[in-house]
Image: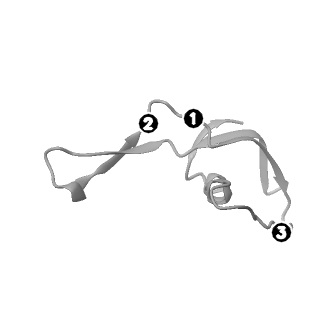
Amino acid sequence: MCVKVNDGSYSWGFKVKKDRNQSALKDRLELDEDLTAVLADVNLDLKHDDKLVVVGKIGSGKTTLLFSLMDETVKLGG
């Protein structure tokens, strides 16, 4: 098995914080204290030669799912 997710919950987990000592171009990301799951109860089991197509409306979580599989989001559970 190559990818297995059981009841995964994911959040972006970052917010932009304005740095008052610097110009607006010097904004920075910091961890959000109130993480809310963007994706919840994700179950996925992909084997070596499986192909996956992710489709959906704008804002339905396609990019978040792909970034979560690459461990680029905050994992809240699963």
First-in-chain label (1 vs 3): 1
- For the point 62% across and 60% down, the residue is 63
Residue 10 placement (x, y as % from top left):
63, 42
Snapshot quadrant of residue 25:
bottom left
User: The residue under label 1 is which amino acid type?
Assistant: Thr
First-in-chain label (2 vs 3): 2
- For the point 63% across and 52% down, the residue is 68
| Comparing labels 2 and 3, the label whose residue is closer to the camera | 2
Count neighbours of disc 2 (C-alpha within 10 A) and say few if under 14, some if 14 to 19, many if 20 or more: few
- Helix, strand or loop for disc 2: loop
- For the point 21% across and 55% down, the residue is 24
Q: Which residue is mark 3?
A: 51
Residue 9 or residue 57, whichever sits in front: 57
- For the point 13% across and 45% down, the residue is 21
Q: Which residue is mark 1?
A: 36
| Mark pair 1, 2: CA separation | 9 Å
The answer to whether the residue labelled 1 contacts the one labelled 3, judged by CB atoms less than 8 Å apart, is: no
- Helix, strand or loop for disc 3: loop
Residue 77 placement (x, y as % from top left):
67, 34
User: The residue under label 2 is which amino acid type?
Assistant: Asp
| Mark pair 1, 3: CA separation | 30 Å
Q: Which residue is mark 2?
A: 32
| Quarter of the image with the C terminus in it | top right
Residue 34 placement (x, y as % from top left):
49, 30
Instruction: Classify residue 42 as left or right of residue 15.
Output: right
Residue 40 or residue 47, whichever sits in front: 40
Q: Quick one: which residue is furthest to the top in this view?
A: 34
Residue 36 placement (x, y as % from top left):
57, 35
The answer to whether the residue labelled 2 contacts the one labelled 3, judged by CB atoms less than 8 Å apart, is: no
| Mark pair 2, 3: CA separation | 34 Å
